Image (cartoon, rainbow, N blue to C red):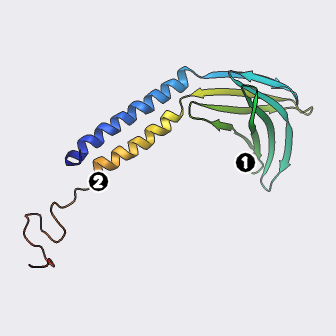
Amino acid sequence: MWGNRPRYGGYIVHVAIILIAIGALGSTAYRVEKEAGLAPGESITIENYTLRYEGLSRYPTKTRLVTAATLSVFVGGHPAGTMTAKKTFHVNFDQAVTEVAIRSGLTEDLYVILGGTNAAGMAAFRVLINPVVSLIWLGGAVMLVGGLIALWPEGAPGRPGQARDGTPGPGAKSD
């Protein structure tokens, strides 16, 4: 394989492109999405996940006003941690930005987007499950390896201290 690195590196890059394509198509075609408005203590179930809305917190920073919604995550009925989706209002730019809560796994990613809130503490959520997103990341890593193999410079043949034609090079010890 090392005798023809550019060819085999190119093959590896093509495998990476296939992985990325499968990941992109799978995450788009098999995406599951659900929207709900929840009061604190209420839950939304999507696929194997149950998300219980715990409540809101609002706090200022020097340049932002942050609204954060915390959700407890249950997978198959078992606790699996918490997620916090945020809506940040940048005072200097008079614009709100949404920070998506992401829970990544090998087979799928769970996204929670905070849509809006009211004074009573209710919140609107959009929840998405994107399968096989990890194949996109794996494909990127495989592409990097294939590119390095294909573009790695050829070493000089022979032993150290020998010129390419096999004659002793400068600084070589004579026998």
Q: Residue 63, how many percent across, how many down?
A: 77, 54
- Please tell me in which quadrant of the rendered image residue 125 appears: top right
Q: Marks 1/2: CA distance?
A: 47 Å
Which quadrant is home to the N terminus? top left
Rendered residue at 44%/41% (across/down):
140
Q: Residue 115, how many percent across, how many down?
A: 76, 31
Q: Residue 82, how many percent across, how many down?
A: 76, 38
Choose between 44 and 125: the one closer to the eye.
Answer: 44
Vertical placement of residue 26 versus 111, above or below: above
Give neighbour class at mark 2: few <14, some 14-19, many 20+ (Cα, 10 Å): few
- Please tell me in which quadrant of the rendered image residue 98 appears: top right
- Please name the amino acid that badge 2 sits on: Trp
Report helix, strand or loop for mark 2.
loop
Q: Which mark is residue 93?
A: 1
Q: Which residue is mark 2?
A: 152
Is 166 situated left or right of 145 in this image?
Answer: left
Choose between 42 and 92: the one closer to the eye.
Answer: 42
Vertical placement of residue 38 versus 96, above or below: above
Vertical placement of residue 8 versus 126, above or below: below
- Please tell me in which quadrant of the rendered image residue 109 appears: top right
Residue sitting farthest toward the front: 175
Is 58 situated left or right of 126 in this image?
Answer: right
- Please name the amino acid that badge 1 sits on: Phe
Of the two numbered discs 1 and 2 in the rendering, the one whose residue sits closer to the viewer: 2
Is 173 situated left or right of 87 in this image?
Answer: left
Report helix, strand or loop for mark 1.
loop
